[in-house]
Image (cartoon, rainbow, N blue to C red):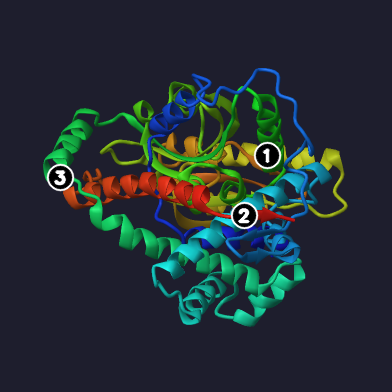
Amino acid sequence: MKLTKLGSKLLGGLATLGLAASPIALQAQAIGQSGASNSNVLNIPDNVVLMGQSDPNVRTATAVVNGTVITGTDVDHRTALLTAASEGELPPEELRRVRMQVLRNLIDETLQIQEAAAQEIEISDGQVNQRYQTLAAQNFGQQTEAMDQYLLSIGSSPASLKRQIKGELAWTSLLRRNISPFINVSEEEVREELKRMEAEKGTEEFRLGEIYLSATAENLETVQQNAAQIVDQLRQGGSFVAYARQFSEASTASVGGDLGWVRLPQLPRELSSQATQMQPGELRGPIPIPGGFSILFLIDKRQILMADPRDATLSLKQISISFSSDVTEASAAAKVETFTNAVASMRGCGDAESVAAGIGADVVSNEIVARQLPEQLQASLLNLQVGQTTPPFGSVNDGVRVLMLCGRDDPETVGGPTIDDLIAQKEEERIQKRAQRYLRDLRNDAYIEYN
């Protein structure tokens, strides 16, 4: 496995150790961001002349947070974990932005650990090591030493990852003590939600990932450029989960930007107009919204209270031909034509093996859920009748093949969420909103020195 892919998997696994995914409506957040910029409440003059250092972001990447030192090595190790999840090396300017964001994340992480200690919440080494071993099991088959070696090989360290785990455990414990017990969702409220869902049966829901960057009138252009650079890195193979964790300013950053399942009315108009045009796996952005910019990634979509056709189990026969390494272009084209004609002559699945044998093709039978197939094939297969085939696909190097549909078990109509499910969902949404305010207050009260 490539290091880049493994880094992406590792960060994706780590996201599951943080706060639970929360389908928070972004509209309230956007209104909150935009409302602050409607008036000059600080009475700042229009023409500002900075005295001293003109760029506050150009700092040595170290800080002291309420007496706790964050070293350049800390930043290096955490940055290495992020860059390992991206394809190729980051440009110098992008790397500088990543390092500054990592420093901000380390400051937040330090505040969370300090707050837990102040409230006598102990995060033991045993708890941290248990989570670390869980990650090792997910990625290295229980071999903790193999994960240690991997982290060192990319320029990070086991200590850096364990510190991040400790920060997330501390924050989860704080929220569980100080916020969760004071969140209440009434059964009446949930029953109204169930009625609404029944009325909207068949309409689409979208599972979206989001990277949100706040902006003001003064830094709008800079933030837009930063967002565009993040999009470029994601299109080149960067991990969306990793970038969301490090760059997004939304409360869902800790879960890789996952908004959960949302409906279009829950989203700001600027985002809903984009989401409705997207297909699973598609990336859009940067999208201007009130208060900043968003980068959207469509993880999946479905219809409310309806079975998803992509959950159908398909019985398929794959009929394929291969080519010798020295085949000429003309010979390959002739062989593909013979193959295509032979497939067209097949009289259903029972005829596949005999016809394939006559042209030297291979036949493999299998059952697979439609959504597990590449996006390009899903729609084609779901529109087939039994005995029909997809158009030929492939290449001379990989071989040319078709898929023949030999059976289909459609999914049962899904039931709606239970009252308990909806209560848990709404409670989580409200916890996340209060968590964002909690962290903001910790930042406001902190003593931070930059070196």
Q: Please state the horizontal and vertical placement of residue 240, each as a whole percent of the image.
A: 59, 46
At label 2, counting other C-alpha atoms closer than 10 Å, the crowd grade (few under 14, some 14-19, many 20 or more) is some
Q: Please state the horizontal and vertical placement of residue 22, each as a whole percent of the image.
A: 38, 47
Mark in the foreground, 3 or 2: 2
Q: Mark 2 points at which residue?
A: 448
Label 3 residue SS: loop
How far apart are the alpha carbons under marks 3 and 2? 41 Å
Label 1 residue SS: helix
Marks 3 and 1: CB-CB under 8 Å? no
Nearer to the camera, 318 or 426? 426
Mark in the foreground, 2 or 1: 2
Left or right of 411, for residue 339: right
Can residue 41 be seen by looking at this rendering? yes
Can residue 362 be seen by looking at this rendering? no
Label 2 residue SS: strand
Q: Considering only vertical position in the picture, is 59 above or below 118?
A: above
Which residue is at a point 79% across and 39% down the rendered structure image?
A: 53
Which residue is at a point 54% across and 70% down the rendered structure image?
A: 135
Q: Quadrant of residue 175?
A: bottom left
Q: Please state the horizontal and vertical placement of residue 336, each as a whole percent of the image.
A: 71, 40
Which residue is at a point 56% across and 29% down the rendered structure image?
A: 292
Sooner in the amino-acid sequence: mark 3 or mark 2: 3
Q: Considering only vertical position in the picture, is 152 above or below 174?
A: below
How far apart are the alpha carbons under marks 2 and 1? 28 Å
Residue type, label 2: Ile
Q: In which quarter of the image is the N terminus?
A: bottom right
Nearer to the camera, 373 or 68? 68
Q: Quadrant of residue 74?
A: bottom right
Marks 2 and 1: CB-CB under 8 Å? no
Q: Name the residue under label 3.
A: 186
Residue type, label 1: Ile
Q: Considering only vertical position in the picture, is 180 above or below 395?
A: below
